[in-house]
Image: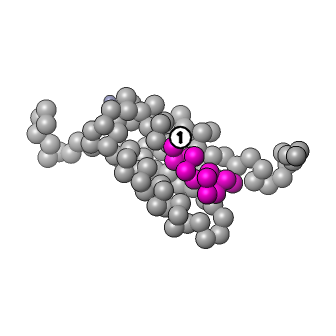
Amino acid sequence: MAEDPAAPDARPVQIPARIHAVGPGWRGLLERLHEQIRAVFPGYRLLDLKEKLGGLRVYVEGPPGSGDRLRSLIALAEVEAEHTCEFCGASGRIRTRDDWPGG
Ligand SMILES: [Zn+2]
């Protein structure tokens, strides 16, 4: 079946197109999130993907009624990112000013 490249939403921007906006340590969980979203909403569109205050932020748009499902999938990935080093992928947690040195 031929794809019409001019058709709207034929090739929406999805997570892989913007995966380099964040560090390599998060790519694995982002690839998994992409597969999870695509499994239920293949035509989803990525609106934004970025690091903010040490956390991962992913904004996507899906078909009508998809919001709750999308938010819950993304929330899981964002929580996982909080415990994953953005740069090397090692598990850890965000440091706060209350952390003991070396803790
Ligand atoms: Zn690291």
What x and y, as percent, mark residue 73?
48, 56
Ligand 1 shown in quarter: top left
Q: How is the image coloured?
A: one colour
Kindly tell me whether residue 87 is visible in this rendering.
Answer: yes
Kindly tell me whether residue 47 is visible in this rendering.
Answer: no
Point 88% across, 44% down: residue = 2
Amino acid type, callout 1: Glu
Q: Secondary structure at mark 1?
A: helix
Say whether residue 12 is magenta.
Answer: no
Residue stretch in magenta: 32-43
Point 17% across, 45% down: residue = 97
Point 37% across, 28% down: residue = 88
Mark 1 = which residue? Answer: 31
What x and y, as percent, mark residue 74?
47, 54
What x and y, as percent, mark residue 67?
55, 66
Point 62% across, 39% down: residue = 17
Q: Nearer the viewer, residue 42 or 8?
A: 42
61 relative to 20, above or below: below
6 relative to 66, above or below: above
> Principal SS element in the magenta part?
helix
Q: Is mark 1 within 8 Å of ligand 1?
A: no
Q: Nearer the viewer, residue 27 or 21?
A: 27
